[in-house]
Amino acid sequence: MIIIRFVRTLVLSLLLLGMFAAPAQAETAPAQTIWRLLDYIAVDYPGAVTGGRVVNEAEYVEMVEFSASVRERLGQLPPHQARAGLLRDAAALQAAISAKAEPAAIAASSRRLGRALLSAYPVPLAPSSIPDLGRGATLYAQNCASCHGAQGDGRGPAAVRMDPPPIDFTDESRARERSLFGLYQVIEQGLEGTAMPSFAHLSPEDRWALAFHVGRYAYPEGLASGGSEIFLEVGVSSKVPDLAALVAITPAQLEQAVGAEKAKAVTAYLRGHPEELSTGSAGSLTLAKERLTQALSAYEAGDRTGATDLALSAYLDGFEPVEPLLSARDASLMGEIEGAMAELRSRIDRGMPAEQVRAQVGEVRSLFTQAEAQLGPESASTSSSFVGAFTILLREGLEALLIVIAMVAFLRKAERTDVMGYVHCGWIAALVAGAATWAAATYVIGVSGASRELTEGFGSIFAAVVLLSVGIWMHGKAQAGAWQRYIAERMSHALTKRSAWFLFGLTFVVVYREVFETILFYATLWSQGNGGAVLAGAAVALVVLAMVAAAMLKYSRTLPIAKFFSYSSALIAVLAVVLAGKGVAALQEAGLIDIRPMAWIPRIGILGLSPTREAVLAQVLTLALVLFGFWYNRRSSAGQNDHAAVSS
């Protein structure tokens, strides 16, 4: 006992003199040292005093000395308006320890003083990125398991020779009083008087990963059952809104706010899934998650309108900016998120029980977490960037190409190449406008999620309406004798300026919609690096599109005029149905149209099929109009042929 007292006194003397044995890399700030002393007091005081009686004299003497050190060191800090208050609180803490106050009161005073200290004298309190839990486990096995044991119970093979013994990280009574920041501090600085060395030679990222790993031994995954749902409850998520809050709060403090059982589940969940509180780095959906939590809180408070707006903001402001990149890397996951978000808004709109809304919020957050893994920089491989650039341009370009080629082929068949310039000017102007939109969005005004969806939605609806009429018209000309009559009546005269500008307008709208979408996708891909792969993917897609265009033009020349109109009308009608579904879906995502999910219907992007009642009805209505128009054309053509036969 005398030897132990001597060692602790020596350690305290070194602490008071600032002569830490830790390597210089730690660069311990004075405020950090004071905070660490306060953390010691909060954690170790219960082992010194119980019920107003000293139960461990050595521990109690240490607490008295540490509290005196806190007060002295506070007086040595640089001048600050909060310092006088900190000194008063330190004096009160010192007096309470001298009076052998209850451990709960001492812990609360120490934590309160520590928070006030770091508020006045800030130090880095949180990791700059999501801790890598796998890396933490590796570091623990390499550096800590021999002493603390493979299971963190303090029974490693080297522990038998140590006095004092290594800390048992599975001891919940001790762990509940220690924050992840406290663990990080010990890892960085070591513990003098023990065999615990400083690991300041590790990078901050590695030290945080190790702190998170160690912090999970008393709060393993088994305790996290229901933690995701509990975290979303009103008053819980607000206690741990971000990583800084998570690493600063102790489980005991969280218990005071939400109760012991909930605190255990939430602590286990968040320490095992820190990505739920990401810091806003690339691939982060922090804003989306925050809006989801706020939407749930508003809904549970009875504010359905506010909940609807917040859920919409979660999609438009939080998810929409990363949607292009996610679409390129995992289109199926993006579809799942869109469907889950639609279901959430539908449940809010229908006033469903709060439990069902909370469950849906939990599902969406889980999908967001999966998306963040896909969106991380480590996923930005050369191959993924190439494939993303290729598929995006091919998918978006094909729709516009089909319509432009159909119009070019039509004008050639009609021998009206004199107005071909209006078509070409239309798609060229769309490219220029798309580039201008990108420039404005990047350097001037920015394009919000709502603006993007509204542009896509209204553009698609307009194009669908126009294509519907054009498709029915072309189908009519495919009927026997209709083309010859049209030639006799109209094509002997020059197309009016109004008709020529109509060709320009249709080409512009259809192509601009696709250019607008493609540019936003490419801007996101480019920001992730691998610019060469993006350019290569775009070049290959352009070659494929050029080959498709050449083949279509060549094939159209060999088709009889009736078949050309028949095939073209069918193609354009299909595109009208596709664009009708896409347009309604985009307006739903912008919050302009209500959502009623139809879970049994698959989401098929290439067909514009979305699993919502409104989008499906729009496509069914468009298809019905197409079929009615085709039927009417056949009936009219049959009547005209009969009339012509009678006349002859």
Image (cartoon, rainbow, N blue to C red):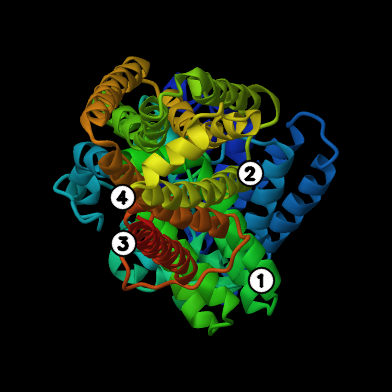
Can you tell which of label 2 and label 1 is closer to the viewer?
A: 2
Question: Which of the two discs, 4 and 3, labels the residue nearer the N terminus?
Answer: 3
Label 3 sits on residue: 170
Do the residues under discs 1 and 4 have CB atoms within 8 angstroms?
A: no
Label 1 sits on residue: 298
Say if residue 107 shows up in the picture. Answer: no
Q: In screen coordinates, is 637 left or right of 440?
A: left
Do the residues under discs 2 and 3 have CB atoms within 8 angstroms?
A: no
Can you tell which of label 1 and label 3 is closer to the viewer?
A: 1
Question: Which of the two discs, 1 and 3, labels the residue nearer the N terminus?
Answer: 3
Can you tell which of label 4 and label 3 is closer to the viewer?
A: 4
Q: Residue furthest top?
A: 532
Label 4 sits on residue: 480
Say what amino acid the circle numbered 2 marks: Ser
Do the residues under discs 1 and 3 have CB atoms within 8 angstroms?
A: no
| Mark 1 and mark 3: Cα distance apart in space | 38 Å
Using the image, determine if residue 249 lies above or below residue 50.
above
Give 601 or 87, whichever is nearer the viewer: 601
Q: Position of residue 55 (x, y in %)?
A: 48, 69
Residue at 36 percent of width and 35 percent of height: 402
Question: Which of the two discs, 2 and 3, labels the residue nearer the N terminus?
Answer: 3
Give 452 or 549, whichever is nearer the viewer: 549
Say what amino acid the circle numbered 1 marks: Ala
Q: In screen coordinates, is 512 left or right of 83?
A: left
Q: Which mark is residue 451?
A: 2
Q: Residue furthest bottom?
A: 353
Quadrant in which the C terminus is drawn: bottom left
